[in-house]
């Protein structure tokens, strides 16, 4: 009997120590990854999740600044060659050793994944990788290329041994999901959960949790109630409407910070006869959006503070350019355009549109935070300065095709659009190149320039910046390009930067990220 | 007989074909999946590559022809998003939806019939009025809203039941389901109740109407006059007779239960095929949408075919009339 009691005490002791050491975290995610293969689909939820398991040459911190990862240092050795020094003594999850061969294998594989719905070719093409020794790599480009570290931070390095001939299915099943990251892959049940566990051999800061389970919970209210009910410990994408209420909840900790995503307006600037702009009576007029005075008037007619306060529930920051302060290449001179309806009316009259005109504002209704409401608020504000604006919003599945290629000969269908842009590279060349450089298929520029804004001086500055390796000079060119394209030309009109909010139960605190990723490495105890 | 079955099978095939044509062209009218899939930072060349790789640059008629050829081989295309066969994705998620639908059916019957009979036997009682008022609410309240309300009350406020996801599963007699574990049942209850609410209300109303009608029949009166116990009258004479319309309705509407599960599955993050189809529609994952609809059509067509064949066995007139 005595023996039995002793045994029970020992058993209880074991159970207690297990409970004390095994720290488990459950996370509610808005969007789950569509694959575990880090090269299959170049999209936010996948790229964010992959960071737990796979490292890249260059890492980024919460403000998208570069940090060493599998590369301990990098520098341009001449105008067209970058050198990456690799970290020694790194072990893959299967115990084998990381070398330069894995990097060479990765850049090959990442460009050739079958069925990939969006590949990493964008970051790898035009680059020649060569191995100098086991821990040094040279990357050559035809032109000087400053964004090399940015590009290298997007591609996850996979093991040449585990991934040889591996298909996307092999990653999804876990067979090939071998990385060097802080967590190891355990299992994925699509639609239900993804489970990872701590990698004790990680070269960086050890992971805080033994096991993490991600659960996809798409509906915002459901995500919040799962947190309140204690079914998950941490959620992302808290809807702004709930932020005020959760702030008062003593069991919940909120973390929010501005993102790299700007919400802005694209305006048709190349068709004299724009499909959704008419005279007040309904007749044809020369497209007023081609006149910079009208675009400037529109910018002054918008009360950004009111949009932030009322439409966004205070969870946004008024925008004066394409990226918030602190990012590389933003202009220090530019502030949000002042709300001044009188000036707007004056400018309209100067441009010969004193009587105003009629226009349709197009926007998505399920893509950006409160997107449809933003469009409605804009319509009211524009109507006040004489522009009869009506609103047409639609699901993103319909919207983006029409906004990019819905018109004649694959041209943009709309005249005036609400859109958003997140600078994946974490610096100003990303929005400038895609939104404001002249649309040029062969150069791969202006791919998302739906207003077809075009200015030779801006193009020149963007190209110059993209070929300038010196960071300070490049920053100057980018800032100057922004000052002209946005500040003088009103090529696009910025509205606000989104603010992202995460919520956890008390005791944890998340370090908000501008790239919108939900990374468990950023979740700490307080 | 053989001629009848052959004729009906041929008709079913035609229905399938026409549906595939409708579904395929319908799905291809909306938007462009490339915009949903591609990283916004990609340049024009990468956008064109994806369009080419997914076969979206071909005319719709050609895409449809490929689809038909593959469908005959038993392949319903590959998901744009997951890169896996659409059929596999759907079948993976089918058990979760089936267990949800079956369990909510069970809830509807177990609670609906006794409540309905009670309301029918004592139509003037306060309890009966409450039941009937409740059934009207069950009909008219939006599923999404009720789901959130259930979560707020039972999970957040009381903390009794989990609010999200499917619980632990176990395999028993070759079937993997969450009804075999306590944790699984706890996870199942709220979504199943949410889904059952509509069906529960109709079972209550059918049971009550049946009871009201049958209780006045001569054979009930005769049984009572003979001195048969009330309990036996209800169990044998009443229950048997009201079950006929209830079973018919339940059987016919089992399909709608699966269809309705989309909303419940979204609210409770239930990993079933309803959630898959909603996600696929949002992301324009065309192969999955088409495959899902084809499977649903196939289920309905097969059920109808089986029912018709059974009918023709039971009632020869169906065969003769059909042959004319």
Image (spheres, coloured by chain):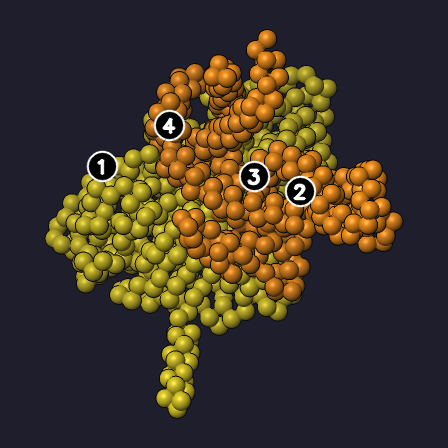
Chain colours: A yellow, B orange
The residue located at (62%, 17%) in the rendering is B317
Spatial CA distance of label 3 from label 4 is 23 Å
| Residue denoted by label 2 | B199
Report the chain holding disc 1.
A
Spatial CA distance of label 2 from label 1 is 67 Å
| Residue denoted by label 3 | B258
Report the chain holding disc 4.
B
Q: Earlier in the sequence, mark 3 or mark 4?
A: 4
Is disc 3 in contact with disc 4, using a CB cutoff of under 8 Å?
no
| Residue denoted by label 1 | A142
Q: Are marks 4 and 2 on the same chain?
A: yes
**Which circle, 4 or 1, is nearer the viewer?**
4
Q: Are marks 3 and 1 on the same chain?
A: no
Q: Earlier in the sequence, mark 4 or mark 2?
A: 4
Label annotation for residue B74: 4
Given the current orientation, which residue lies at the most extreme front position? B226
């Amino acid at each position: 009997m005595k023996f039995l009691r002793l045994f029970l005490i020992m058993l209880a002791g074991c159970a207690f120590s297990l409970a004390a050491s095994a720290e488990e975290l459950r996370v509610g995610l808005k969007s789950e990854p569509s694959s575990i293969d880090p090269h299959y689909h170049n999209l936010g939820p996948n790229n964010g999740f992959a960071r737990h398991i796979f490292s890249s040459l260059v890492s980024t911190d919460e403000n998208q600044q570069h940090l060493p990862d599998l590369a301990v240092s990098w520098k341009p050795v001449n105008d067209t060659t970058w050198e990456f020094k690799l970290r020694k003594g790194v072990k893959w999850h299967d115990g084998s050793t990381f070398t330069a061969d894995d990097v060479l294998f990765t850049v090959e594989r990442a460009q050739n994944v079958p069925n990939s719905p969006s590949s990493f070719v964008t970051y790898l093409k035009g680059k020649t990788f060569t191995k100098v020794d086991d821990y040094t790599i040279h990357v050559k480009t035809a032109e000087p290329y400053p964004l090399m570290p940015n590009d290298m931070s997007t591609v996850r390095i996979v093991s040449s041994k585990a991934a040889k001939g591996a298909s996307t299915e092999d990653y999804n099943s876990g067979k090939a999901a071998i990385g060097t990251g802080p967590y190891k892959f355990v299992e994925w049940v699509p639609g239900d959960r993804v489970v990872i566990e701590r990698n004790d051999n990680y070269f960086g800061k050890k992971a805080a949790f033994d096991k993490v389970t991600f659960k996809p919970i798409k509906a915002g209210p459901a995500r919040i109630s799962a947190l309140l009910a204690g079914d998950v410990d941490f959620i992302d994408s808290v809807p702004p409407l709930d932020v005020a209420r959760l702030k008062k909840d003593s069991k919940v900790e909120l973390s929010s910070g501005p993102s790299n995503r700007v919400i802005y307006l694209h305006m048709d600037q190349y068709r004299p006869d724009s499909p959704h702009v008419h005279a007040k009576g309904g007749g044809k007029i020369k497209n007023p959006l081609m006149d910079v005075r009208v675009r400037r008037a529109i910018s002054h007619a918008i009360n950004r503070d009111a949009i932030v306060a009322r439409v966004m529930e205070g969870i946004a920051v008024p925008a004066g350019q394409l990226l918030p302060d602190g990012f590389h290449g933003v202009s220090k001179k530019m502030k949000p355009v002042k709300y001044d309806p009188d000036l707007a009316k004056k400018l309209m009259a100067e441009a010969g549109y004193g009587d105003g005109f009629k226009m349709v504002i197009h926007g998505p209704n399920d893509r950006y935070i409160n997107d449809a409401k933003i469009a409605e608020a804009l319509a009211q504000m524009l109507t006040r300065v004489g522009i009869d604006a009506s609103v047409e919003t639609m699901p993103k599945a319909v919207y983006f095709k029409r906004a990019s290629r819905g018109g004649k000969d694959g041209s943009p269908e709309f005249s005036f659009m609400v859109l958003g842009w997140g600078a994946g590279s974490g610096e100003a060349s990303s929005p400038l190149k895609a939104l404001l450089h002249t649309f040029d298929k062969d150069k791969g520029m202006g791919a998302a320039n739906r207003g077809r804004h075009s200015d030779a001086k801006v193009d020149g500055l963007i190209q110059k910046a993209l070929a300038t390796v010196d960071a300070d000079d490049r920053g100057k060119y980018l800032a100057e390009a922004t000052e002209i394209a946005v500040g003088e030309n009103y090529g696009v009109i910025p509205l606000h930067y989104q603010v992202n909010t995460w919520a956890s139960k008390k005791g944890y605190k998340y370090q908000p990220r501008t790239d919108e990723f939900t990374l468990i490495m950023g979740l700490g105890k307080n | 007989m053989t001629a009848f079955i052959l004729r009906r099978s041929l008709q079913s095939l035609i229905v399938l074909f026409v549906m595939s044509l409708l579904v395929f062209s319908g799905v291809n009218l909306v938007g462009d999946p490339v915009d949903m899939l591609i990283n916004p930072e990609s340049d024009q060349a990468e956008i064109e590559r994806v369009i080419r790789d997914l076969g979206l640059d071909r005319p719709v008629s050609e895409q449809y022809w490929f689809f038909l050829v593959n469908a005959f081989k038993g392949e319903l295309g590959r998901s744009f998003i997951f890169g896996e066969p659409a059929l596999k994705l759907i079948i993976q998620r089918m058990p979760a939806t089936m267990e949800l639908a079956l369990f909510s059916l069970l809830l509807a019957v177990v609670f609906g019939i006794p409540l309905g009979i009670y309301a029918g036997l004592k139509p003037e009682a306060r309890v009966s009025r409450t039941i009937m008022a409740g059934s009207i609410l069950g009909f008219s309240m939006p599923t999404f809203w009720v789901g959130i309300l259930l979560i707020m009350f039972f999970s957040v406020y009381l903390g009794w039941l989990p609010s999200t996801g499917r619980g632990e599963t176990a395999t028993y007699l070759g079937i993997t389901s969450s009804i075999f574990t306590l944790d699984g049942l706890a996870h199942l209850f709220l979504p199943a109740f949410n889904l059952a609410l509509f069906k529960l209300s109709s079972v209550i109303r059918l049971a009550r109407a049946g009871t009201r009608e049958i209780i006045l029949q001569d054979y009930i009166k005769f049984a009572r006059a003979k001195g048969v116990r009330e309990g036996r009258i209800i169990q044998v004479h009443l229950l048997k007779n009201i079950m006929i319309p209830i079973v018919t309705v339940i059987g016919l509407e089992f399909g709608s239960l699966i269809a309705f599960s989309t909303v419940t599955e979204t609210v409770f993050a239930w990993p079933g095929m309803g959630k898959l189809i909603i996600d696929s529609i949002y992301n324009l994952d065309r192969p999955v949408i088409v495959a899902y609809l084809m499977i649903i059509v196939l289920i309905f067509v097969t059920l109808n075919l089986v029912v018709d064949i059974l009918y023709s066995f039971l009632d020869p007139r169906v065969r003769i009339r059909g042959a004319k």
